[in-house]
Image: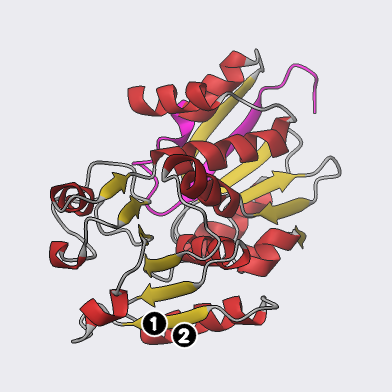
Amino acid sequence: MSSNQTRIAGVIGDPVAHSKSPAMHNAAFAHFGLDAHYERWHTPLADLPARIESLRAPHMYGANVTLPHKLAIMPLVDEVDAIAELIGAANTIIRLPDGRLRATNTDAPAFLDEVTHVCGLNPDGLSVVILGASGAARAAAFALAHAGAARITIINRTIEKAEELLGDVLASLDHDPILTYAAPDEPDLTEVIGDATLIVNATTLGWHGDETPLDAAFILPSMTVYDMVYRPTKLLADARSRGAQAHDGLGMLARQAIIAFEHWTGRTPPLDLMLTALRNA
């Protein structure tokens, strides 16, 4: 790579036009005076191998990875670090100096930071309901389980995916939290959700209009609702109307980006810088 060649990073997904990651990372590059640029890379599944291969070019930093590719990228890189291996999903690719590619997961530590610092909850002993069984749901479930959550319930349309996720979580632990699952149309859903302290939306429901993954009737004032979707959603509005705490996913997006940026550049952007860039995007 020539010394004056602009370094490149980007976000890989399908769709990806909604991503606010360029605003954050380009603000961070400017903050540190780096000759670098961050792009959106719309990548259907059929094009994923070629896209990953392109990251080996000397001017590439690497990439963030969003839906639906957080599991599909795993076999396409040269190495998967311990946290991504444990979770079984990755959201960040780092180009190493020799051109090899390493995958990691920055969602899990970012989410845990949000639970403790923004929601004000101690994960140890927590009772949690996670909506969905996506790569983001896997990150949340593993992070909470390994931080000592006492009960984790997965609510997902495809029961087999929920079973598989909880089986993987259990296999990774040296203790036995209560792990349960249910479908969204479960007749006894009130009982399933029970007295959960934290409800996490890890589905894509909420990106469009007034769709929601959970009816307002299931939300109690004693609950905290964390929606990984980073826009105003019906779920969050319902939570506030029911007297519950409600937080969107903007902070998680910023925190995972900071960790990825550290991997690529060795520098740590301020959280306020990233959040400001997101809000202005």
- Residue 105 in view in this figure: yes
Q: Is residue 61 above or below residue 241?
A: above
Residue 131 is situated, as x and y percent measured from the top left of the image, at: 34, 67
Q: Circle 1 is placed at which residue position?
A: 181
Residue 9 magenta-drawn?
yes
Q: Quadrant of residue 172?
A: bottom right
Q: Quadrant of residue 220?
A: bottom left
Span highlighted in magenta in the image: 1-23
- The amino acid pointed to by label 2 is Glu
The residue at the point 43 percent across, 23 percent down is 277
Are the residues flagged by discs 2 and 1 in contact, CB closer than 8 Å?
Answer: yes
Residue 261 is situated, as x and y percent measured from the top left of the image, at: 64, 34
Q: Is residue 86 above or below residue 251?
A: below
Left or right? Give the position of 138 relative to 183. right
Mark 1, residues whose alpha carbon is within 10 Å: few (<14), some, or many (≥20)? many
Left or right? Give the position of 198 relative to 69. left
Q: Which of the two marks, 2 or 1, is nearer to us in this view?
A: 1
Q: Quadrant of residue 96?
A: top right
Q: Circle 2 is placed at which residue position?
A: 163
Question: Helix, strand or loop at disc 1?
Answer: strand
| Front residue (pair 219, 111) | 219
Residue 63 magenta-drawn?
no
The residue at the point 57 percent across, 15 percent down is 30
- The amino acid pointed to by label 1 is Tyr
Q: Is residue 189 above or below residue 32?
A: below
Residue 268 is situated, as x and y percent measured from the top left of the image, at: 66, 27
Report the Cα–Cα distance between label 2 and label 1.
Answer: 7 Å
The residue at the point 60 percent across, 44 percent down is 63
